[in-house]
Image: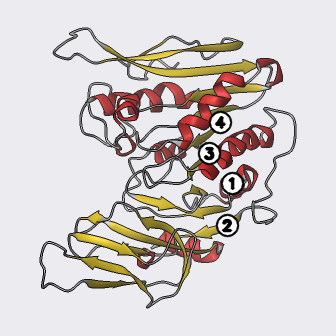
Amino acid sequence: MASEVAASRIRSEVDFDKPGRQAGYLRAPLSRNTSGWGTVEIPIVVVKNGRGPTILLTGGVHGDEYEGPIAISRLARSLDPASVQGRVIMIPALNIPAVLNDTRLSPVDGRDLNRCFPGDPRGTFSEMLAHFVDAWILPHVDVSIDLHTAGHSMDAALSTNMHYLPDPDIRQRTLAAAEAFGAPYNVVFWGVDEGATLTSSVERRGILSLGTELGGWGRVNVEGVRIGERGILNILKHFDVLEGRPETIQRDGAAGTRHMMVRDPDCYIFAPAGGLFEPCDLAGAEVYAGDRAGWLHFVEDVDRPPIEVHHRRSGIVWMASGPGRVQRGDVVCVVMNDYDDAAASMQDRS
């Protein structure tokens, strides 16, 4: 590792360059009332053999998203080093305090790990962890697959996702990787706050980055787990780390992945007030501009009528509201459209 890389307070039990299978922990210091020299143990498995690319698989960046940790844990237990050509770094539950607490945010510092990149080695727990990933793991990596769901806040149509990438070569390579992963949808999107995410850190280093949304609503999505498990194996095959061809046939018989995009800000619907949101549509439903997206109820005020909330874009629901109770400014629906490269390019310039 280059000498100019800032030292990390986190220590790794694994040697990223050692052949074979290693299972251990990243040990992050956490001084607390009951343990002045306490540490947080973050499970990590590295499998290395032969020559080939390095694939990073991460889950549990948010602690209430379950499909990724399940899928990666299964692969970490079963992956045979003799079958690998390259290196696979598997971190099933990166934000382990949040995973054990079943929350999106870390119970240690109240931060969203996925809004802390590239991090700070002297910062809060989440900033320290983000820095370790960015500075000490990503330099080894050629391809990053970060498995997410919509957590407790929403439900998502089962999908991979990516940012629009101005470089046409890496954009096409990422679209091809999404096709190989084999989720029903792949969504090119511009988020509300993307600059401090793991994805953005990966992209800044020129590494191929692919995310997922494999369910939500605070439960384990059976089909999301299946798509996640199949998808990470497909990625390893696509990049010749494992032998074989990706399997991409969908449950409905479709031959592969449908590329989509979140075309513009009108695809996002925000709650106009705090209240109880009753959605009209589930994730994956086709909707039309002007249709009712749902009602915002004020059940504590007996004479106050509900507010009707309407779609501003036609398309397919990518994200559907989950928790019921929302605050003003919360996203209650996201609509996606079929991918158009020229339209995506114009959106990226706006």
Q: Amino acid at mark 3?
A: Val
Q: Amino acid at mark 2?
A: His
Q: Report x, y in % for residue 38.
A: 28, 12
Closer to viewer: mark 4 or mark 2: 2
Q: Earlier in the sequence, mark 1 or mark 4?
A: 4
Which residue in the rendered view is the most extreme toward the front?
A: 302
Q: Amino acid at mark 4?
A: Asp
- Quadrant containing the C terminus in the rendered view: bottom left
Which residue does the image show at 53% across and 18% down from the upper left? 1
Q: Report x, y in % for residue 263.
A: 52, 75
| Cβ–Cβ under 8 Å for marks 4 and 2 | no
Q: Which residue is mark 1?
A: 178
Q: CA distance from mark 1 to mark 4?
A: 15 Å
Quarter occupied by residue 268? bottom left
Q: CA distance from mark 2 to mark 1?
A: 9 Å
Q: CA distance from mark 1 to mark 3?
A: 17 Å
Which residue in the rendered view is the most extreme toward the right?
A: 244
Image position of 312 (left or right of 173): left
Label for residue 259? 2
Q: Which residue is mark 3?
A: 225
Q: Amino acid at mark 1?
A: Ala
Closer to viewer: mark 4 or mark 3: 3
Compare residues 66 and 315 and report the one nearer the observer: 66
What crowding class fits label 2: few (fewer than 14 Cα within 10 Å), some (14-19), or many (20 or more)?
many
Which residue in the rendered view is the most extreme toward the bottom?
A: 290
Q: Earlier in the sequence, mark 2 or mark 1?
A: 1
Q: Is residue 138 above or below residue 341?
A: above
| Cβ–Cβ under 8 Å for marks 2 and 3 | no
| Cβ–Cβ under 8 Å for marks 2 and 1 | yes
Q: CA distance from mark 4 to mark 3?
A: 24 Å
